[in-house]
Image: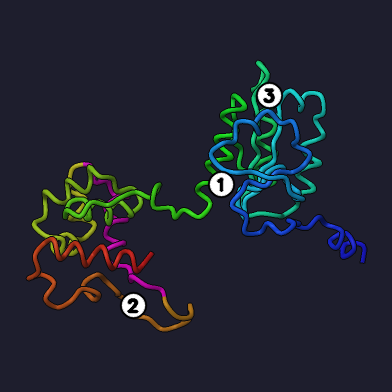
Amino acid sequence: MASAEAQARRPQLQIRGAQSSSSILVNSCQRGNPMLPHIKGVAWEYADIVPDYQVGLSSGVLFLSLKYHRLHPEYIYTRIQNLAHMYTLRVLLILCDVSDHQPAIRELTKAAVIHRLVIMVAWSAEEGARYLETYKAFEQKPPDLIRARVGEDPMSILQSVLTQVRGINKADVLTLATRYHSFYDMVRQTPEQLLVLPGMGDRKARSLAQAFREPFRADGAKNEQKPAEASWEDALPDHFESLPEEEQLRIAMQLSMESS
Protein backbone atom coordinates (compact mmCIF):
# COMPACT_ATOMS: atom_id res chain seq x y z
CA MET A 1 0.00 0.00 0.00
CA ALA A 2 2.78 2.37 0.94
CA SER A 3 4.61 1.73 -2.33
CA ALA A 4 1.42 2.34 -4.31
CA GLU A 5 0.90 5.67 -2.53
CA ALA A 6 4.52 6.63 -3.17
CA GLN A 7 4.10 5.83 -6.85
CA ALA A 8 0.94 7.93 -6.96
CA ARG A 9 2.86 10.87 -5.48
CA ARG A 10 5.70 10.48 -8.02
CA PRO A 11 6.11 13.69 -10.06
CA GLN A 12 4.42 13.38 -13.43
CA LEU A 13 5.30 15.14 -16.65
CA GLN A 14 3.26 18.35 -16.63
CA ILE A 15 3.37 20.78 -19.50
CA ARG A 16 0.68 23.40 -19.70
CA GLY A 17 -0.59 23.36 -23.27
CA ALA A 18 2.87 22.95 -24.78
CA GLN A 19 3.11 19.27 -25.78
CA SER A 20 3.61 20.16 -29.44
CA SER A 21 5.67 23.28 -28.75
CA SER A 22 8.49 24.16 -31.11
CA SER A 23 10.19 26.03 -28.28
CA ILE A 24 12.65 24.89 -25.65
CA LEU A 25 10.65 24.65 -22.43
CA VAL A 26 12.43 26.15 -19.43
CA ASN A 27 11.72 25.51 -15.78
CA SER A 28 11.10 28.76 -13.89
CA CYS A 29 13.91 27.83 -11.47
CA GLN A 30 16.32 28.60 -14.31
CA ARG A 31 15.55 32.33 -14.32
CA GLY A 32 18.85 34.16 -14.43
CA ASN A 33 20.78 31.23 -15.88
CA PRO A 34 23.62 32.72 -17.99
CA MET A 35 22.80 30.33 -20.85
CA LEU A 36 19.37 31.79 -21.56
CA PRO A 37 20.55 35.02 -23.28
CA HIS A 38 22.63 32.89 -25.64
CA ILE A 39 19.72 30.71 -26.84
CA LYS A 40 19.02 32.52 -30.10
CA GLY A 41 18.72 29.77 -32.69
CA VAL A 42 15.36 28.52 -31.37
CA ALA A 43 12.60 30.05 -29.27
CA TRP A 44 12.26 29.27 -25.59
CA GLU A 45 9.56 29.78 -23.00
CA TYR A 46 8.95 29.07 -19.33
CA ALA A 47 6.75 26.07 -18.55
CA ASP A 48 5.71 23.88 -15.64
CA ILE A 49 8.14 20.96 -16.16
CA VAL A 50 10.17 18.71 -13.87
CA PRO A 51 13.61 18.99 -15.56
CA ASP A 52 15.34 22.31 -16.11
CA TYR A 53 14.89 22.18 -19.87
CA GLN A 54 12.73 20.13 -22.17
CA VAL A 55 14.20 19.95 -25.68
CA GLY A 56 11.74 17.37 -27.04
CA LEU A 57 8.66 15.46 -26.02
CA SER A 58 10.88 12.66 -24.70
CA SER A 59 14.05 14.68 -23.96
CA GLY A 60 14.71 16.34 -20.63
CA VAL A 61 17.81 18.21 -19.44
CA LEU A 62 19.07 18.87 -15.91
CA PHE A 63 21.53 21.74 -15.58
CA LEU A 64 24.33 21.88 -13.00
CA SER A 65 27.05 24.42 -12.38
CA LEU A 66 30.10 22.82 -10.78
CA LYS A 67 30.58 25.93 -8.66
CA TYR A 68 27.06 25.47 -7.29
CA HIS A 69 27.67 21.74 -6.89
CA ARG A 70 30.57 22.44 -4.55
CA LEU A 71 28.33 24.50 -2.28
CA HIS A 72 25.29 22.21 -2.50
CA PRO A 73 26.43 18.68 -3.39
CA GLU A 74 23.05 17.16 -2.52
CA TYR A 75 21.10 19.38 -4.93
CA ILE A 76 21.60 17.39 -8.14
CA TYR A 77 20.72 14.08 -6.48
CA THR A 78 17.40 15.53 -5.32
CA ARG A 79 16.69 16.73 -8.86
CA ILE A 80 17.54 13.32 -10.30
CA GLN A 81 15.24 11.68 -7.78
CA ASN A 82 12.41 14.02 -8.77
CA LEU A 83 13.01 13.24 -12.43
CA ALA A 84 12.34 9.56 -11.60
CA HIS A 85 11.86 7.58 -14.82
CA MET A 86 10.62 10.42 -16.98
CA TYR A 87 11.95 10.93 -20.50
CA THR A 88 13.72 8.61 -22.89
CA LEU A 89 16.69 10.93 -23.40
CA ARG A 90 17.86 12.24 -20.02
CA VAL A 91 20.73 14.71 -20.16
CA LEU A 92 22.84 16.15 -17.37
CA LEU A 93 24.29 19.39 -18.75
CA ILE A 94 27.29 20.43 -16.66
CA LEU A 95 28.76 23.93 -16.75
CA CYS A 96 32.45 23.58 -15.92
CA ASP A 97 33.12 26.87 -14.12
CA VAL A 98 35.81 25.71 -11.66
CA SER A 99 39.48 24.93 -12.24
CA ASP A 100 39.70 21.66 -10.31
CA HIS A 101 36.84 19.91 -12.10
CA GLN A 102 38.09 16.31 -12.47
CA PRO A 103 36.86 14.91 -9.11
CA ALA A 104 33.39 16.41 -9.50
CA ILE A 105 32.97 15.22 -13.08
CA ARG A 106 34.16 11.75 -12.08
CA GLU A 107 31.56 11.66 -9.31
CA LEU A 108 28.78 12.92 -11.57
CA THR A 109 29.70 10.43 -14.29
CA LYS A 110 29.13 7.56 -11.87
CA ALA A 111 25.77 9.03 -10.88
CA ALA A 112 24.83 9.44 -14.55
CA VAL A 113 25.58 5.79 -15.31
CA ILE A 114 23.44 4.63 -12.38
CA HIS A 115 20.49 6.88 -13.26
CA ARG A 116 20.63 6.50 -17.07
CA LEU A 117 21.72 10.05 -17.79
CA VAL A 118 23.80 11.35 -20.68
CA ILE A 119 26.49 13.79 -19.55
CA MET A 120 27.30 16.87 -21.61
CA VAL A 121 30.06 19.18 -20.34
CA ALA A 122 30.02 22.83 -21.41
CA TRP A 123 33.00 25.09 -20.76
CA SER A 124 31.01 28.28 -21.16
CA ALA A 125 27.40 29.47 -21.06
CA GLU A 126 27.51 29.98 -24.82
CA GLU A 127 28.52 26.37 -25.40
CA GLY A 128 25.78 25.11 -23.10
CA ALA A 129 23.21 27.15 -25.03
CA ARG A 130 24.43 25.62 -28.30
CA TYR A 131 23.88 22.14 -26.89
CA LEU A 132 20.29 22.97 -25.97
CA GLU A 133 19.66 24.52 -29.39
CA THR A 134 21.10 21.50 -31.17
CA TYR A 135 19.01 19.02 -29.19
CA LYS A 136 15.87 20.99 -30.03
CA ALA A 137 16.76 21.58 -33.69
CA PHE A 138 17.35 17.86 -34.25
CA GLU A 139 14.31 16.70 -32.29
CA GLN A 140 12.46 15.46 -35.40
CA LYS A 141 15.49 14.73 -37.56
CA PRO A 142 16.11 11.13 -38.73
CA PRO A 143 19.48 9.51 -37.90
CA ASP A 144 20.61 9.71 -41.54
CA LEU A 145 23.04 12.55 -40.82
CA ILE A 146 25.13 10.39 -38.46
CA ARG A 147 24.49 7.02 -40.11
CA ALA A 148 27.40 5.60 -42.05
CA ARG A 149 26.94 5.94 -45.79
CA VAL A 150 27.59 2.93 -48.01
CA GLY A 151 28.89 3.60 -51.51
CA GLU A 152 27.13 2.07 -54.49
CA ASP A 153 30.26 0.49 -55.99
CA PRO A 154 30.71 -3.29 -55.52
CA MET A 155 33.73 -2.97 -53.20
CA SER A 156 31.93 -0.62 -50.81
CA ILE A 157 28.93 -2.93 -50.67
CA LEU A 158 31.17 -5.94 -50.06
CA GLN A 159 32.94 -4.11 -47.22
CA SER A 160 29.62 -3.11 -45.69
CA VAL A 161 28.41 -6.72 -45.73
CA LEU A 162 31.52 -8.55 -44.56
CA THR A 163 32.63 -6.12 -41.86
CA GLN A 164 29.39 -6.99 -40.04
CA VAL A 165 31.11 -10.29 -39.18
CA ARG A 166 32.95 -10.09 -35.86
CA GLY A 167 36.70 -9.53 -36.37
CA ILE A 168 36.55 -8.87 -40.11
CA ASN A 169 37.98 -5.49 -41.13
CA LYS A 170 38.38 -3.68 -44.44
CA ALA A 171 41.87 -5.11 -44.98
CA ASP A 172 40.43 -8.63 -44.68
CA VAL A 173 37.71 -7.76 -47.19
CA LEU A 174 40.35 -6.54 -49.64
CA THR A 175 42.26 -9.81 -49.20
CA LEU A 176 39.12 -11.85 -49.85
CA ALA A 177 38.17 -9.79 -52.89
CA THR A 178 41.68 -10.19 -54.33
CA ARG A 179 41.82 -13.95 -53.73
CA TYR A 180 38.35 -14.94 -55.00
CA HIS A 181 36.86 -14.02 -58.36
CA SER A 182 33.26 -13.76 -57.17
CA PHE A 183 31.19 -13.57 -54.02
CA TYR A 184 29.84 -17.02 -54.86
CA ASP A 185 33.36 -18.48 -54.73
CA MET A 186 33.97 -16.73 -51.44
CA VAL A 187 30.97 -18.14 -49.58
CA ARG A 188 31.79 -21.72 -50.66
CA GLN A 189 35.10 -21.75 -48.78
CA THR A 190 35.60 -23.82 -45.62
CA PRO A 191 37.31 -22.42 -42.51
CA GLU A 192 40.44 -24.39 -43.42
CA GLN A 193 40.55 -22.82 -46.88
CA LEU A 194 40.02 -19.31 -45.49
CA LEU A 195 42.74 -19.86 -42.91
CA VAL A 196 45.52 -19.81 -45.53
CA LEU A 197 44.77 -16.19 -46.45
CA PRO A 198 47.14 -13.49 -45.11
CA GLY A 199 45.89 -11.98 -41.87
CA MET A 200 43.06 -14.51 -41.57
CA GLY A 201 43.55 -16.27 -38.24
CA ASP A 202 41.58 -19.21 -36.96
CA ARG A 203 38.97 -17.11 -35.18
CA LYS A 204 38.30 -14.89 -38.19
CA ALA A 205 38.13 -17.85 -40.58
CA ARG A 206 35.62 -19.70 -38.41
CA SER A 207 33.51 -16.60 -37.79
CA LEU A 208 33.35 -15.82 -41.49
CA ALA A 209 32.54 -19.41 -42.50
CA GLN A 210 29.87 -19.58 -39.82
CA ALA A 211 28.30 -16.32 -41.02
CA PHE A 212 28.18 -17.69 -44.56
CA ARG A 213 26.33 -20.81 -43.41
CA GLU A 214 23.94 -19.40 -40.83
CA PRO A 215 20.28 -18.85 -41.83
CA PHE A 216 19.42 -15.26 -42.68
CA ARG A 217 16.25 -15.25 -40.59
CA ALA A 218 15.13 -16.64 -37.28
CA ASP A 219 11.36 -16.44 -37.84
CA GLY A 220 8.89 -18.53 -35.87
CA ALA A 221 9.06 -20.12 -32.45
CA LYS A 222 12.34 -21.34 -31.05
CA ASN A 223 11.12 -24.93 -31.08
CA GLU A 224 10.14 -24.81 -34.72
CA GLN A 225 11.90 -27.45 -36.79
CA LYS A 226 14.48 -25.98 -39.15
CA PRO A 227 16.92 -27.50 -41.62
CA ALA A 228 20.00 -28.72 -39.84
CA GLU A 229 22.45 -27.39 -42.45
CA ALA A 230 21.08 -24.04 -43.59
CA SER A 231 23.66 -22.25 -45.71
CA TRP A 232 24.10 -19.33 -48.05
CA GLU A 233 23.77 -21.67 -51.00
CA ASP A 234 20.23 -22.53 -49.90
CA ALA A 235 19.24 -18.85 -49.80
CA LEU A 236 20.86 -17.78 -53.08
CA PRO A 237 18.94 -18.03 -56.37
CA ASP A 238 19.78 -20.91 -58.73
CA HIS A 239 21.29 -18.59 -61.35
CA PHE A 240 23.35 -16.67 -58.77
CA GLU A 241 26.72 -17.82 -60.14
CA SER A 242 25.93 -16.55 -63.64
CA LEU A 243 24.99 -13.06 -62.43
CA PRO A 244 27.41 -10.12 -62.71
CA GLU A 245 29.47 -9.58 -59.60
CA GLU A 246 27.74 -6.27 -58.85
CA GLU A 247 24.35 -8.02 -58.89
CA GLN A 248 25.72 -10.78 -56.64
CA LEU A 249 26.82 -8.17 -54.10
CA ARG A 250 23.48 -6.37 -54.31
CA ILE A 251 21.65 -9.61 -53.47
CA ALA A 252 24.06 -10.32 -50.62
CA MET A 253 23.54 -6.82 -49.22
CA GLN A 254 19.77 -7.25 -49.35
CA LEU A 255 19.91 -10.62 -47.58
CA SER A 256 22.22 -9.16 -44.93
CA MET A 257 19.82 -6.31 -44.23
CA GLU A 258 16.89 -8.70 -43.97
CA SER A 259 18.74 -10.78 -41.42
CA SER A 260 19.60 -7.82 -39.16
- The disc label shown at residue 103, or none: 3
Tell me which amino acid carries mark 2.
Ala
- Whether residue 73 is in magenta: the answer is no
244 over 225 or under it: above or below:
above
Where residue 115 appears, x then y in whole percent?
69, 46
Q: Is residue 114 visible?
A: no
N-terminal-most mark, 2 or 1: 1
Question: Over which residues does the magenta segment extend?
Answer: 199-218
In depth, the one of 180 and 197 nearer the eye is 180
Mark 1 vs mark 3: in front: 1
Q: Residues within 10 Å of mark 3 (few under 14, many from 20)?
A: few
Q: Residues within 10 Å of mark 1 (few under 14, many from 20)?
A: many
74 over 201 or under it: above or below:
above
Q: Residue furthest bottom?
A: 225
N-terminal-most mark, 2 or 3: 3
Dominant SS in magenta: helix
Q: Residue furthest top?
A: 99
Mark 1 highlights which residue? 136
- 22 to the left or right of 246: right
212 over 50 or under it: above or below:
below
